Amino acid sequence: MASPKILLIVGGGIAAYKACELVRLVKKAGGEVTCVLTEGGSHFVTAMTLAALSENPVHTTLWDLKNEVEMGHIQLSRQADLVVVCPATADLMAKMAAGIADDLASTLLLATNKPVLAVPAMNVRMWQHAATIRNVATLHASGVTVMEPDEGAMACGEYGPGRLPEPEAVWAQIRTMLGGDPLAAQPDFATPAHRPLFGKHVLVTAGPTHEPIDPVRYIANRSSGRQGFAIAEAAAEAGARVTLVAGPVNLPTPPGVERIDVETAREMAAAVEAALPADVAVMVAAVADWRVAEEVGQKLKKDGSGKIPPLSLTENPDILAGLAKSAQRPGLLIGFAAETHDVVAHAQAKLARKGADWIVANDVSGDVMGGAVNAVHIVTAAGVESLPEMAKGDVARELVERIANAL
Ligand code: CTP
């Protein structure tokens, strides 16, 4: 990565001092940093400090006419390769989610056409508040990458998630977003023990697909997406960069996960291909095996004759089997198998047929599909491990632990 240009927006929080360390890391690696200091941020670090460290002028106000002549705020927002908001306060993220532009930082964030990374830091209750959860989901949906805050003791005396991640982790995320490999480039960055998937890219598919019959009808299945979303969440918690390709489901995006929404099996196949390369792919989606051979552009109507319209079906691409054969096959490829009978035997056959490394099989003859619990069998070439029935979040964490061990 040749000399990346970072526009660093420093929000108002005690963690702002860590932004100074981040500037130092980017500069040390040969990058360029231009800082924007919010009014709040200026109560914690000075423009002088950031200017000295970045060796660039620091921008603080929208109404600086001289700067507007020399460099308009639109230009400022677009000349960088990446915009980083660090620390991203609850207030700044709320403004970003709502599209409010009432100071230089929020205006730049609305005007930019570059990728944006938000690095949150706030009190644990503020991080867990429904409003912040909503705002983070909105930011994810609009393409902003939001890092997971660290967990631990806070400046305010409370304990929990909300601490700004260490500057080294932020710099690693920046390099990932700019196309570099943070671990290869920065061998000094130890993988934190509680983040065993740090530096890995995990691709997850989840939910059903909808295959249109006509503009108002479609073929679907009962998958809720909950197990796949739980796996994406657990992988992100373990420090992975996670891409979640989701069929039509009614679920919030887990924090720190990049979500791509699709409808049909063919759209899902294309989104999976676009997300490669990945270190691990976990294909949890209940992809429709068939679609209507000829989709009609107009609603099918009853003509009064009692005749039923013939629906001829054609097979959808098998995304998992295709990935197994592709040149970009992930190092660890995991499929799911929803079965109603002979669960393990079918899973073993699927393992061979699809070319996966593991098949996670579950019995869906009860109300697993859409339910909160699951009992799975992990089928590999080495044998079968059966887990007891547990919440889907726990199944996800068990699986992520095994993925981390396998890597
Ligand atoms: N899968 C896929 N693309 C498809 C069908 C399935 O990627 N077109 C993946 C699923 O995401 C899952 C695995 O393959 O990881 C097994 O899915 P399943 O529906 O159980 O397998 P099928 O091949 O459809 O077998 P069957 O429906 O006959 O049991």
Image (cartoon, grey):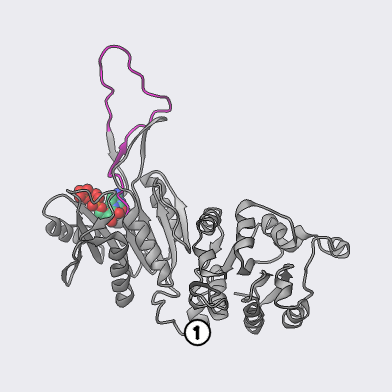
Which residues lie in the magenta part?
285-312
Residue 241, image quadrant: bottom left
Q: Secondary structure at mark 1?
A: loop
Residue 88 image offset from top left, x and y in percent:
61, 67
Please state if 229 lies on the left or on the right of 60 as rendered.
left
The quadrant of the rendering that contains the N terminus is bottom right
Query: Magenta segment, principal secondary structure?
Result: loop
Q: Considering depth in this image, is 291 or 194 the residue closer to the camera? A: 194
As drawn, which residue projects farthest toward the front?
A: 157
Residue 289 within the segment the image draws in magenta: yes
Residue 188 position (above or below residue 237):
below
Please state if 142 lies on the left or on the right of 259 as rendered.
right
As drawn, which residue projects farthest toward the top?
A: 304
Residue 278 image offset from top left, x and y in percent:
41, 66
The residue at which mark 1 appears reads as: 189
Question: Callout 1 environment at 10 Å: few (<14), some (14 to 19), or many (20+)?
Answer: few
- Look at label 1 and name its amino acid: Phe
Evaluate whether residue 91 shows in this view.
Answer: yes
Evaluate whether residue 326 shows in this view.
Answer: no
Residue visible at 57% across and 76% down?
156
Residue 336 image offset from top left, x and y in percent:
26, 58
Residue visible at 46% across and 53% down?
260
Residue 286 within the segment the image draws in magenta: yes
Residue visible at 44% across and 75% down?
198
